[in-house]
Amino acid sequence: MATIEYFLFPLSSYSYLAGLRLEEIAARRGATIVYKPFQVQQVYAAVGTPNVADRHPSRQAYRLQDLARVARAVGLPINLRPAHWPTNPAPASAAIVAAQAAGGGDLGGFVHGVLKAVWAEDRDIADDAVIRDLLGAHGFDAALADRGLVAGMAALERNTEEAIRRGVFGAPSYLVDGEVFWGQDRLDLLDARLGEGG
């Protein structure tokens, strides 16, 4: 069985626009997903990529146009200037780590719910109440939001160091047998790679 390592950032617009396509591909291909939240700003610093706010105005303008186009193409609502972006991603990241360890719920749905909260619902994922609500809505114990913060933060740091070491430079990034697929627009290529059977 193939494994997809999904390096994700809970505030990533393009991760939101991936929807649940990764989960659909994994189900069809019989693959397992390992969710690895990481700190994209630390990766940017390591590889020399400016944060969104520090990029050239033409690149910032293009990003907004592209987000709107992609959202229309995939049929997802999007607020191009969300009320709570940026915000502290740590509570959501720790909850993703805790939910994956606990099992028993819809982890892909929870991760997408976190992203949707930012980009379509103007909810603040730094708010523990929002995280508890999303956990419960996807079949997890809402109390996971209040537990495991230290373990979650340690995992977040490990994932970030691993991302840099393994050639990840942005979000979303998907790894199959060490091969990096960057961006939601590479999911078709990831699907084809899984179809090759390694």
Image: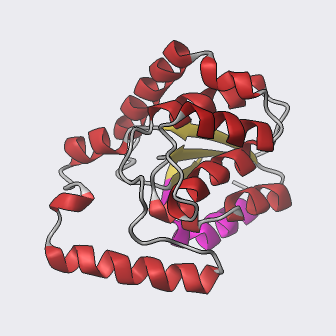
Dominant secondary-structure state across the stretch colored magenta? helix
Task: Locate residue 62: give its quadrant.
Answer: bottom left
Q: Quadrant of the C terminus?
A: bottom right
Task: Based on the picture, tell me whether residue 195 belongs to the magenta stretch.
Answer: yes
Between 38 and 81, the residue placed more toward the observer is: 81
Q: Residue 128's spot in the image, x, y percent?
A: 56, 31
Residue in the picture at 51% in, 45% down: 7
Q: Position of residue 49 (x, y in %)?
A: 21, 55
Task: Indicate the position of residue 148 as horizontal and vertical percent values.
Answer: 59, 15
Please name whichever residue, 60 or 189, is drawn nearer the observer in this view of the structure. 60
Task: Give the position of the N terminus as an image quadrant.
Answer: top right
Please tell me which residue is depicted at 29% across the width and 44% down the height of the picture: 41
Of residues 29 and 146, the one drawn nearer to the viewer in this rendering: 146
Q: Quadrant of residue 57?
A: bottom left
Residue 3 appears in the figure = no
Specify the segment rendered in magenta: 180-196
**Residue 132 left/right relative to 138:** left
Q: Is residue 53 left or right of residue 19?
A: left
Say which of 43 and 82 sits in front.
Answer: 82
